[in-house]
Image (cartoon, grey):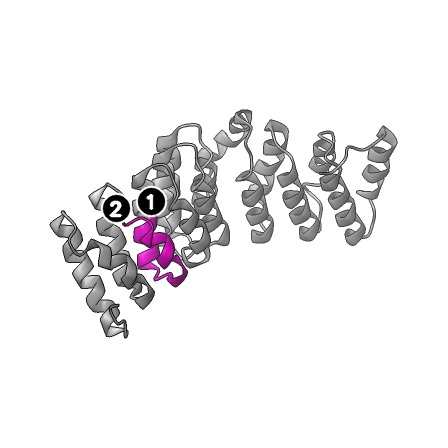
C-alpha cells in the first residue's frame, strides 16, 4: 500500500516537476502523486487537467483512480469531457471506481451533458438504482471499451436488480466475450434472478469454460434457473455438459425436461456419448 509523503517538501518538489518542459517528466510526476496515497495530491493533479500533452492528461485520469471522494470526482468530471478519447476513457474507468457517496454531487451535473456517452457513464453511478439500471442497459449499444467496463463494474452493484440488468446486457453487447470470467463469478450471486441472466448470457456467448459453473446451477430449486441452465448448455453444445444434464432427465418441470432433451441432442451432434 502506498505511503503518504513524509513532508510538505515532497509535495512541493513534485509540484515543481509538474511544471517541467518535458512531458515525460510531467507524467512521471503524476505517477509519483498516484503512488503517494496522499489526499493532498488530488489538488496537485487538478492543476494538470489542462496540460497540453494528452498523455499527461490521460495519466492524471488514471492516477485519480487511486483516490476517492468528491475532490477526485470533480477533477474526473472535467477529464471525462476531454476531446481525446483515451483521456475520456481513462477518466470513465477511474470514475467507476469511486465509492464515496459524496462523489455523486460532483458527477450529477453530467446527467445533462450534451454527449450521450458522458450522460450514461455518469448515470451508472447515480444514487437511484432505477437510473443505474437504465444506464447500464443503454450502454449495450456502445462499442467503446469504457462502456463494457462500466457494465462489468455494475455486476458488483449493491442493488441486485442492477446486477441482473448488467448480467443480461453483457450477453448482447460487444464487451460480453471479454467479460466471461466476470459472468461466471456472478453465478454465485445470492439472487437466482442474477444467476439466471448470467447463465443466459454465457449461453448466448457460447462460453465453453462456463460449462461446469452452469452445471452447478442445475440443482437449484428454482425451475426457471434449471431451465435456463439446460438451454445455455445446449447453446454451448460442449459434450462436457452432458453429465450435468443426465440428472435432469426426470425433472418435475416439463419445460426443464424439454430443454434437457434439446441440449442433449445438440451435444450428441457434437460427438457426446452418454455414459
Numbered range of the magenta stretch? 198-218
Q: Position of residue 26 (x, y in %)?
A: 78, 47
Report the side of 259 relative to 114 (left or right).
left
Using residue 163 as the reference point, say whether residue 243 is left or right of it.
left
Q: Residue at x 41, y 60 (%)?
A: 209
Of residue 248 and residue 233, the one placed in the foreground of this image is: 248
Residue 187 location (% of width, % of height): 37, 46
Answer yes or no: do the residues labelled 2 and 1 have beta carbons within 8 Å?
yes
User: Residue at the location (71% across, 41% down)?
Assistant: 34
Identify the residue at image location x=27%, y=44%: 220
Callout 2 environment at 10 Å: few (<14), some (14 to 19), or many (20+)? Answer: many
Q: Quadrant of the C terminus?
A: bottom left
Is 189 or 147 nearer to us in this picture?
189
Label 2 secondary element: helix
Residue 143 visible in rendering = no
106, above or below 148, in the image: above
Which secondary structure class fits the magenta region best? Answer: helix
Which residue is the site of mark 2?
A: 225
Q: Which mark is residue 195?
A: 1
Residue 35, numbered label: none
Question: Up-down: is 8 above or below 114?
Answer: above
Q: Quadrant of the N terminus?
A: top right
Left or right: 196 as drawn, with respect to 189 = left
Q: Specify whether residue 201 is painted magenta.
A: yes
Mark yes or no: residue 164 visible: yes
Query: Horizontal and vertical percent for residue 65?
Result: 62, 40
Q: Position of residue 109 (x, y in %)?
A: 49, 30
Amino acid at each position: 500500500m502506498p505511503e503518504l509523503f513524509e513532508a510538505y517538501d515532497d509535495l512541493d518538489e513534485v509540484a515543481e516537476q509538474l511544471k517541467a518542459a518535458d512531458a515525460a517528466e510531467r507524467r512521471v510526476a503524476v505517477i509519483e502523486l498516484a503512488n503517494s496515497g496522499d489526499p493532498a495530491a488530488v489538488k496537485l493533479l487538478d492543476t494538470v487537467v489542462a496540460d497540453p500533452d494528452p498523455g499527461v492528461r490521460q495519466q492524471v485520469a488514471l492516477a485519480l483512480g487511486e483516490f476517492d471522494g468528491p475532490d477526485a470526482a470533480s477533477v474526473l468530471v472535467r477529464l471525462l469531457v476531454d476531446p481525446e478519447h483515451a483521456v475520456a476513457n481513462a477518466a470513465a474507468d477511474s470514475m467507476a471506481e469511486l465509492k464515496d457517496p459524496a462523489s455523486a454531487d460532483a458527477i450529477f451535473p453530467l446527467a445533462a451533458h450534451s454527449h450521450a456517452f458522458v450522460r450514461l457513464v455518469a448515470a451508472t453511478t447515480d444514487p437511484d438504482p432505477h437510473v443505474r439500471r437504465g444506464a447500464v442497459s443503454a450502454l449495450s449499444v456502445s462499442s467503446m471499451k469504457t462502456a463494457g467496463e462500466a457494465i462489468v463494474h455494475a455486476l458488483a452493484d449493491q442493488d441486485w436488480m442492477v446486477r441482473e440488468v448488467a448480467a443480461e446486457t453483457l450477453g448482447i453487447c460487444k464487451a460480453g466475450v471479454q467479460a466471461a470470467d466476470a459472468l461466471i463469478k456472478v453465478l454465485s450471486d445470492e439472487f437466482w434472478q442474477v444467476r439466471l441472466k448470467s447463465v443466459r448470457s454465457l449461453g448466448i456467448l457460447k462460453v465453453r469454460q462456463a460449462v461446469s459453473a452452469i452445471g452447478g446451477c442445475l440443482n437449484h430449486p428454482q425451475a426457471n434457473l434449471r431451465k435456463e441452465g439446460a438451454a445455455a448448455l445446449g447453446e454451448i453444445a460442449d459434450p462436457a455438459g452432458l453429465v450435468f444434464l443426465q440428472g435432469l432427465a426426470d425433472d418435475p418441470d416439463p419445460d426443464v425436461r424439454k430443454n434437457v432433451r434439446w441440449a442433449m441432442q445438440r451435444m450428441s451432434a457434437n460427438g457426446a456419448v452418454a455414459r
